[in-house]
């Protein structure tokens, strides 16, 4: 015999199908027990994210409890009926308190107990075939848990009328009274279900080669819902003016005040509020409680579903750095290998995605394609590369769409990374603003559980746009991020591949944060071995003793600070020039990896105390700061520091074009020669012994300009430069 309840768990949906067509799917004890068992099992199954309740064959959804069984039992000892009601009540309670969304398709007769299993559902779909009623009074019974409780919540005397008369409602009437949340013509619903089933079949069989056209229900509404019919002779209700401020200056205009009063009274406040102005209890009771609240639903409160991301050991991907600057590597390519490992480890959980505007390969992250593909729903042509229906990389040339995808993905309890060209991440500025505000507020809600951080990788950055030029040169996204609530945002500027590995691992393990990583993709010198990189990153900022020429415990003559990969390179090259030109100069090199360490500790959790800052940057020595972005941000972060007046920042000055890498830094006066000359200018005590060096550096800039225009590439001394020292002890060699 066929099962009277068909239970199916396919993909993310658990489906309950009533299958007793000759009895119009009337419920018996076994059916209620089977439904209760399925709900209990699916509650603990993370793979099931939604429950659907509908019927198999036949003309109705559910005709209620099995009246014949109840009558027969009542004529005897009543034990069978009592057993049925006990299980039915337990089922109704489980439906009402279920944390996962439930959809009930009330297509056809929905009566008695059918009301009881449909009304607790979050989404209740009525159709033109719906016949909704509580007909028990017609046979001498009073509506039980199914209708008695739910119908009593209807406004006025409607619930009493339906319960006592057995009046039948059609689908449209159910929608109008709130007994249904959606209304569909039956034929449209049947067609939609058939379409969905076919799409699923093709996808699961691997035979689909076209992007599916998923059924969509379009709700058409007026621009403005309500308002006065007219104000000053101009249409308001149902018109765009209803979406503005429809009534102006009611304090000074009696006519407008009367319009406002009439409009407000049209909402019948006396039916909504009691004499004390409090919301009436019968309306207050309509609000869902506990896990039924909109924000507490696991699929809107992804922290409840969150599982830890499995990550490989970042040290396994480290670049060997036998001595500072002795190795060349592409930082993001190394990062890509690490991400490929992350994709593999989380393949079964399907909890990690990479989003980006068609730049995964361009940004050197293409190692991930060893473990996954780009997800693609259109036809896959023979010439296509790395496309699949189930890929974990989502690419489309639309930054705001990638942002939306990732935010939604995080809100369901999963993890992700957004890779983007630095200049174009600005497209999502306002979306980042809203996410930051949401994180700030959500932290104050006890029931809101943390979600994985919003992680950005900004590469193809301002300093290496050899083929794109000025349109692709804008490092200002970090300025926007730095404005947000301190405990929400983090900004990282790893100077090489090993520091990038540490930062990536760290960011992917965090929650309720916005992490911005800025890193280059071009071959560049590697400065720190993985152990040293980990120490440096944990601190966020530190002195690179191997690069400086300090003596003993005294303050240096000058501090050369840097933040970002290209500024770090140019700073170290400037230090080399100065060490050669003024061998007895005491130089301190400070690298800032975590930008927010520059803020006072009272302003940001990662901020340095004043004492710590002074130990690094001194209280009175010149600081030449080479920064990746707009110089003003460094001044803003450090304006309260003791030595702020001696901090001289060079960064992007809105000068750019399609040119050579070194010419780009020269245009913005961030190059090694300008940095060295700035340092000399800030130390007048050097006098004549540095003057000749300064003239020589200025001459090299003139020579650079001539050379790059003549040859179209940087001078050999620039292209071939590498850090020439192993330790600070070799100063002056």
Image: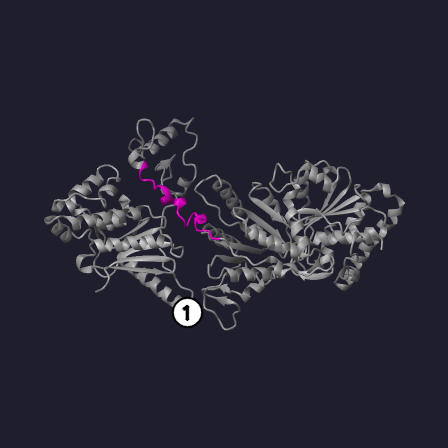
The residue that appears at 28% across and 54% down in the rendered structure is 35
The answer to whether residue 61 is seen in the rendering is no
**Which quarter shows the N terminus?**
bottom left
SS under mark 1: loop
Residue extending furthest toward the bottom: 382
Quadrant assignment, res 159? top left
- Please rate how many residues cluster around mark 1, counting C-alpha atoms within 10 Å: few if below 14, some from 14 to 19, many from 20: few
Residue 298 in the image: x percent, y percent? 41, 49
Q: How many marks overall?
A: 1
Answer with the quarter of the image where residue 295 lies.
Answer: top left
Near-viewer residue (364 or 194): 364
> Position of 39 compared to 617: left or right?
left
Q: Which residues are magenta?
A: 284-307
In the image as oriented, which residue stretches furthest toward the left?
A: 75
Nearer the observer, 656 or 581: 581
Between 371 and 707, the one lying in front of the other is: 371
Q: Residue furthest right?
A: 688
Q: Which residue is mark 1?
A: 206
- From the viewer's perspective, is 264 left or right of 533? left
The residue positioned 38% from the left and 60% from the top of the image is 11
Look at the image and say whether residue 364 sits in the magenta stretch. no
Quadrant, the C terminus: bottom right
Camera sees residue 28: yes
Residue 553 x/y as whole percent? 79, 42
- On screen, 188 above or below 695? below
Q: Is residue 724 above or below residue 221?
A: below
* Percent coordinates x, y for residue 381 in the rendering: 48, 71
Along the line of sight, the residue nearer the viewer: 585 or 135: 585
Q: Could you tell whether 469 is left or right of 546 in the image? A: left
Here the colouring is: one colour
Q: Position of residue 347 (x, y in %)?
A: 48, 61
């Amino acid at each position: 015999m066929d099962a009277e309840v068909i239970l199916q768990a396919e993909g993310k949906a658990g489906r309950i199908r009533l299958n007793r067509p000759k009895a119009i799917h009337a419920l018996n004890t076994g059916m209620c027990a089977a439904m209760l068992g399925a709900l209990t099992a699916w509650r603990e199954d993370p793979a099931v994210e939604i429950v659907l309740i509908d019927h198999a064959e036949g003309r109705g959804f559910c005709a209620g409890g099995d009246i014949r069984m109840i009558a027969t039992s009542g004529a005897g000892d009543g034990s069978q009926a009592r057993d049925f009601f006990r299980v039915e009540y337990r089922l109704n309670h489980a439906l009402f308190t279920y944390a996962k969304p439930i959809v009930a398709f009330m297509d056809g007769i929905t009566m008695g107990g059918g009301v009881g299993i449909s009304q607790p559902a979050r989404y209740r779909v009525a159709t033109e075939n719906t016949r909704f009623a509580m007909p028990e009074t017609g046979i001498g019974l009073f509506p039980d848990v199914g209708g008695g409780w739910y119908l009593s919540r209807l406004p006025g005397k409607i619930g009493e009328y339906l319960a006592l008369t057995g009046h039948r409602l059609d689908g449209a009437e159910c929608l109008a009274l709130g007994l249904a949340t959606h209304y569909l013509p039956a034929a449209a619903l049947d067609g939609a279900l058939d379409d969905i089933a076919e799409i699923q079949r093709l996808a699961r069989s691997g035979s689909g080669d076209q992007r599916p056209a998923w059924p969509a229900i379009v709700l058409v509404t007026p621009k403005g819902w309500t308002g006065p019919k007219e104000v000053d002779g101009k249409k308001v209700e149902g018109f765009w003016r209803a979406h503005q401020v429809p009534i102006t200056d009611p304090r000074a205009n009696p006519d407008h005040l009367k319009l406002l009063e009439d409009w407000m009274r049209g909402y019948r406040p006396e039916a909504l509020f009691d004499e004390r102005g409090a919301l009436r209890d019968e309306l207050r009771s309509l609000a869902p409680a506990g896990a039924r609240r909109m924000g507490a639903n696991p699929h809107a409160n992804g922290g409840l579903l969150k599982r830890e991301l499995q990550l490989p050991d970042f040290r396994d991907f480290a670049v060997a750095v036998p001595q500072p600057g002795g190795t060349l590597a592409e930082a993001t390519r190394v990062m890509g290998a690490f991400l490929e490992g992350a994709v593999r480890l989380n393949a079964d959980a399907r909890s990690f995605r990479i989003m980006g505007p068609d730049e995964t390969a361009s940004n050197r992250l293409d190692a991930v394609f060893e473990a996954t593909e780009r997800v693609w729903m259109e036809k896959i042509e023979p010439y296509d590369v790395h496309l699949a229906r189930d890929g974990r990389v989502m690419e489309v040339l639309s930054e705001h769409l990638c942002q939306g995808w990732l935010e939604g993905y995080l809100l369901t309890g999963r993890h992700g990374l957004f890779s983007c060209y630095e200049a174009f991440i600005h497209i999502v500025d306002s979306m980042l603003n809203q996410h930051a505000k949401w994180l700030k507020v959500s932290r104050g809600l006890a029931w809101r559980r943390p979600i994985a951080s919003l992680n950005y990788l900004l590469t193809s950055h301002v300093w290496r746009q050899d083929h794109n030029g000025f349109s692709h040169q804008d490092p200002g996204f970090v300025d926007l991020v730095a404005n947000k609530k301190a405990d929400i945002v983090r900004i990282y500027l790893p100077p090489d591949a090993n520091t990038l590995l540490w930062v990536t691992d760290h960011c992917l393990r965090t929650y309720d944060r916005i992490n911005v990583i800025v890193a280059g993709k071009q071959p560049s010198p590697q400065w720190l071995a993985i152990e040293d990189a980990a120490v440096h990153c944990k601190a966020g900022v530190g002195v690179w003793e191997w690069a400086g020429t300090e003596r003993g415990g005294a303050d240096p003559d000058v501090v050369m600070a840097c933040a970002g990969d290209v500024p770090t390179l140019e700073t170290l090259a400037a230090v080399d020039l100065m060490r050669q030109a003024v061998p007895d100069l005491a130089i301190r090199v400070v690298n800032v990896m975590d930008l927010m360490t520059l803020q006072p500790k009272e302003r940001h959790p990662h901020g340095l105390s004043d004492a710590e800052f002074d130990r690094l940057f001194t209280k009175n020595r010149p600081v030449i700061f080479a920064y990746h972005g707009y110089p003003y941000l460094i001044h803003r972060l450090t304006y309260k520091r003791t030595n702020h007046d001696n901090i001289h920042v060079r960064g992007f000055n809105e000068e750019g074009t399609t040119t050579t890498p070194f010419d780009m830094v020269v245009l913005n006066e961030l190059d090694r020669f300008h940095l060295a000359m700035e340092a000399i200018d800030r130390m007048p005590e050097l006098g004549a012994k540095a003057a000749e060096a300064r003239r020589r550096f200025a001459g090299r800039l003139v020579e650079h300009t001539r050379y790059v225009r003549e040859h179209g590439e940087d001078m050999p001394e620039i292209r071939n430069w590498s850090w020439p020292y192993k330790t600070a002890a070799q100063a002056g060699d």
